[in-house]
Image: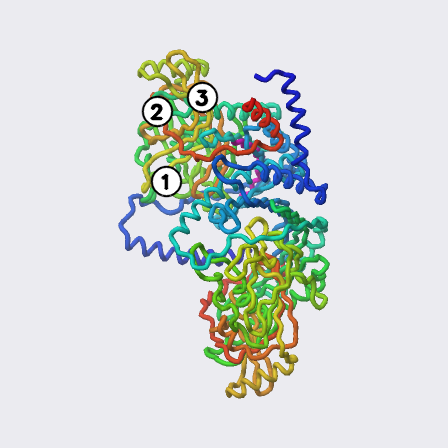
Amino acid sequence: MISAPLRVLLLVAVISFTPSFAQPPASMQTDDPLLQAMQTEMARSKAQLKLEGMSSPYYIDYRVVDVDEYRAEAAYGALRSDTRTRFRFLRVVVRVGSYKQDSFFSQGEGVTQVMPLDDDIVAMRHQIWLATDRAYKDATEALTAKQAQLKQYTVDQPVDDFAAAEPLQSITPLTHLDIDAVPWRKTIQDVSALYATDPEIQSFDSSIYLQAVNRYFLNSEGTVIRSGQNLATLSIAATTQAVDGMELDRSPGYMVSDFKDLPTPKDLLARATNMVASLKELRAAPLVDEDYRGPVLFSGDASATVFADFVGENVLGVKPDLGQQARTKGAWASSYKTRVLPDFISVVDDPTLSSLNGKSLMGHYEFDDEGVKAARVPIVENGKLVNYLVGRTPIRDFPNSNGHGRARIPANNPGPSLGNLIVRSSETLSHDDLKKKFIELCQQRELPFGYYVETFGPRRTPRLLYKVWVKDGREELVRGAVLGDLDVRSMRNDVVAAGDDVYIENRTLNIPHSVVAPSILFDELEVKRANANKNKLPEYPAPAVATRK
Amino acid sequence: VLWRLTYSEYRNASRAYLNVKTKMQVNAQEEDQSPDFSEEPAQQHADSTPLPASADQARLEAMVRRYSALLSKYPEIYSSYAIVSEQITRLHFVSSEGTQVVIPSATVRLAIEAETRAEDGMELLRFETFQAESLDHLLAESEITARVAKMATDLKALRAAPLAEPYNGPALLSGRAAAVFFHEVLGHRIEGHRQRGENEGQTFTKKVDELVLPEFLSVTDDPTQRQLNGTDLSGWYTYDDEGMPARRVEVVKNGVLKTFLMSRIPVKNFSKSNGHGRSQPGAMPVGRQGNLIVTSSNSTPNGQMRQKLIDEVKKQGKPYGLYFEDIQGGFTLTQRAAPQSFQILPVMVWRVYADGRPDELVRGVDIVGTPLATMNRILITGDQTEVFNGMCGAESGTVPVAAASPAILFSEMEVQKRAHSLNRPPILPPPGFESDAVPAKKGSQS
């Protein structure tokens, strides 16, 4: 039994003791309650988290993503959904072991939890406390499980589990979702009302998605990063059917990081009107020929898609599964320092660029999601693969992060990802010269026409594909095609020229990034008819539009 | 939207119809040759009373903050939350038979959960929900606050409680516990569509007009009853999800099974809906429970029920009986492929000793059993009906239901040990309670 006076004394002692670990380092003092909560729990966990008989963590990180978002969707001129959501997710990673071999494996890969939205420091600390406790215990078990599994393999060239990185501090202002939803609701309603201009349109919708994302990152090495970014996606989509039943769709969109770069209602309406017109043209367009093998010209838009898919996917230095010997998981796992593209093509990934030719780049960031400074990385130099994009998980020959460890919103673990993927050609042709060369190639093969891809839909099916006639250069829209042998090999061997244009595509799928590419010419690709089912046309027409208003 | 859905559903239906016709030729005849869909008169009911205004969001937020803050006082409650949701709905239903139904509805649901872990790793959970048609109908704040405080003291007691041992003997279920028992054990097995189909266990299919419960018990399912003893019943509705008017159905009368809870899927001898076709939006309605209410003609004042339990324990020569004060829910299996069984997840279970020792709280108990055997072991009931409001999930989705029952004494009930994790409690003390740990440390040093 402790007597009353003694208890008081002890309490006083405790109170005066608390600040020594409750306060963040002097250089990083902040008014931000969330950051304070993270710092306090970090200090406590670093100092005290230990299971008896087990080792303490050698590394801890806390990542919080705070998202305020607005979403609205309209169809057939009427609002279909309209929501404003706010959420905060916490991800805690605790690593036990050492940089050489640690617990980052299976259940040891971290714990995700929902964080309180109120800036109530104790409530936030409580959630971090629980997640840290769980993550540490899971990590302790995971390390043993990993070591047990590794005993079954011989590993010839061991790679460290975690790369060292310099501690960095950067606190930039928070971003807020200051928007007036009313005009956006009206715009998407007005745009989707365009369905009524063409009775053959079967579905038509338009949506707006605005996000203010604030990211917090803190690790036990002393890194403290806070940054804010806005993201916006505005899209329109419509479907129709050709008389033979082929389903046709278009879904153009805008993705920007500065809301001011979104199109005006007038521009959006013009784009949508254009889309309706192109669907009408597609309905009337003839089916593509059964067989074709020959030159195919890609617009910058189409080219950006294939560079993202065949280059972007394969330059990510994703560590292979436990015990596997490959360098990465991609198709270019064993292509290091070999030729992967034509000699005249070079590719860099440069997240440090915030805009290009006056257009903002969505893949711009200062620090990645592992608290490493973003860096410009040459990937392909004169056709040869010279680098992979890596985060803090090393792969063979790449022991250090090059600032490309990025995470999906809200709470995935970071992994190697694209920033701004920029494709450049050392030999360029003007638009006219490129088309001339394309036609010459067709003539050499004695083909009456070649194909020009303007844009792709999902799974690289051409959405707008033109037959270009050799005799007069006329372009004729066709439908129902797929490209037969478009792959990594054809990117390396069959691209023969590139344009002097610079197409910028902002993409938000999972992780915001940009792809910049010129138009390219393939000297040989297969274009064939899609093997798709043709659904019957509706048994009866759409409701009469005249009854509206 | 309606145009596109109609023609695409017509195509799906045409294809399905062809498949069904072929299957009927290829497969052996099903036991139950009832038609696929019942003929019903068209309903016209347009209730266009304006929907109630939604509660002020800030007020709801402040309310859950208050309840959640109550639990943050207790260092041993590692994790807790309070959720409030309000749903205001207007359902529109039209059919080609001429039915036109428009029904407004509203619910407010408050859920509070608190969790702790015993030293051996067992997770201990208390969960309370409060449901009503509007915020004003919800239990008074002072009463909810008292319930939250009880959750905390219950958990503290549970952490210290000994583990229960497997046991088979007399058991007393409180009204709320008994209500869940009837929902799982009887309620799900009298849902009409479960009486056909070759995969269903069909416990009661051929028991119509036979005794399935003791003669002093009757069971009705009455979705038209809006309140019971002043509590809003969450299984209240006026029209079901097939546009049929809700009806009070006497399922078991004086122990004898009379009928089933019917949607428009007919079963042998029951060709019409009785207004129990329910589903969550977007799912296909089937026969489901609304407000399942158990009544008894053999009741004893609640105050004497504990003594009756002790008498039965003594009669059987057992050292103790079990009293189930509260439960968090349950589930049941009705498919043939699995054993016909049910499980109820009690939280507050007491050993009531025959020798006069004080009652002892135990933890880690699950009730298990098979339906027919258990229902025949009911001896007597209490005299006060208690309500359990909840959400019930089955093949047609999650629907709000209520179950009500008096306390029930069973001559025999089987319990098993609950599986639990072996995770230790957190290593560090919770934020805000660091000081509590430090004196303890110093104390052990001195």
Residue B139 can be seen in this image: no
| Outermost residue toward the top in this view | B356
Query: Residue at 68% of width from left, 54% of height from top?
Result: A230
Measured in 3D between alpha carbons, the distance from the residue under mark 2 to the one under mark 1, in whole angstroms, is 32 Å
Which residue position is annotated with label 1? B194
Say few, some or many: other residues with alpha carbon within 10 Å of mark 3 (under 14 / 14 to 19 / 20 or more): many
First reached walking from the N terminus: tag 1 or tag 3: 1
Which residue position is annotated with label 2? B167
Q: Chain of mark 3?
A: B
Camera-near label (1 vs 3) is 3
Q: Provide residue A67's location: percent of width, then percent of height.
A: 64, 48
Report the magenta stretch's main SS.
strand
Q: Quadrant of the C terminus of chain B?
A: top right
Q: Provide residue B430's location: percent of width, then percent of height.
A: 58, 32
The residue type indicated by label 3 comes to Leu
Dot 3 and dot 2 residues touching (CB under 8 Å): no
Residue B361 numbered mark, or none: 3
Measured in 3D between alpha carbons, the distance from the residue under mark 1 to the one under mark 3, in whole angstroms, is 38 Å
The residue type indicated by label 1 comes to Arg
**Nearest to the observer: residue B216 or residue A418:** A418
Say few, some or many: other residues with alpha carbon within 10 Å of mark 1 (under 14 / 14 to 19 / 20 or more): many
| Outermost residue toward the front in this view | B446
Q: Which residues are magenta?
A: B101-115
Camera-near label (2 vs 1) is 2
Residue B305 can be seen in this image: yes
**Nearest to the observer: residue A35 or residue A519:** A35
Residue B363 numbered mark, or none: none
The answer to if B113 sits in the magenta stretch is yes
Q: Is residue A189 above or below residue A530?
A: above
The answer to if B174 sits in the magenta stretch is no
